[in-house]
Image (spheres, rainbow, N blue to C red):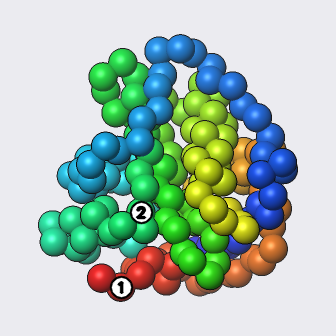
Amino acid sequence: MPVEVRHLEMLAPKSLGVRKRPDPQFRLRCAARPDWQLNRELYLAVGGSWGWSDRLCWDDARWRAWVESPELVTLFCYQRQTPIGFAELLRRPLEGVEIVQMGLRPEFTGRGLGGWLLCEATRRAWATPTHRVFLRTSSGDHPAALTNFLARGFRAYKTVRHLAHHAENPALPAL
């Protein structure tokens, strides 16, 4: 099945469209210390419905190296004490800050949390000295993903069509 990948970017923090937290029971926390097991758990839980497969072949050492990279920041979304979503921000010195992965467990979608999570992740990305925040989304992602990205102020700059999902994400650095 053909997959369309859209590359999106935001070139100024003032472009960010605000989305308020829909319910005070949800909180966002920056990982105090890297927790590769939680990143993996959320990657599998969030991405399972959308065919995320680029990290399925990663062993524990690869997960640990990825999450412990000094260039990666992970934000976790919690309902009370339960992690329900995440966003990974990767600092790329020449390119900007990439929102590599972002999403919520399926049972928490459709509540307005995705827009809030994206807004907060983008705000955090702009808090890092950068000239650009960027991300990719595909036709296989949540149906509201592209609309959410555009509503927050991201703009498409490239579209690539593939015959199928790739086993490896070319945007992820080899570790």
> Badge 2 is on which residue?
72
Which quadrant holds residue 175?
bottom left
- Give the amino acid type for the residue marked by disc 2 in the picture: Leu
Give me the C-alpha separation between circle 2 and circle 1.
14 Å
Amino acid type shown at disc 1 = Ala
From what the image shows, is residue 55 above or below residue 89? Answer: below
- Is residue 147 at least partly visible in the picture? no
The reply to whether the C-beta atoms of the residues labelled 2 and 1 are less than 8 Å apart is: no
Instruction: Identify the element where label 2 is drawn.
Output: strand
Which percent across, then down, holds residue 83? 34, 33
Q: Position of residue 21 (x, y in %)?
A: 62, 23
Q: What residue do we see at 78% from left, 46% from top?
A: 16
Residue 174 badge: 1
Q: Residue furthest left?
A: 60
Q: Residue at x 64, y 78 (%)?
A: 95
Residue that sits furthest to the front in the current view: 129
4 with respect to 66 (left or right): right
Quick one: 28 or 60, which is closer to the camera? Answer: 28
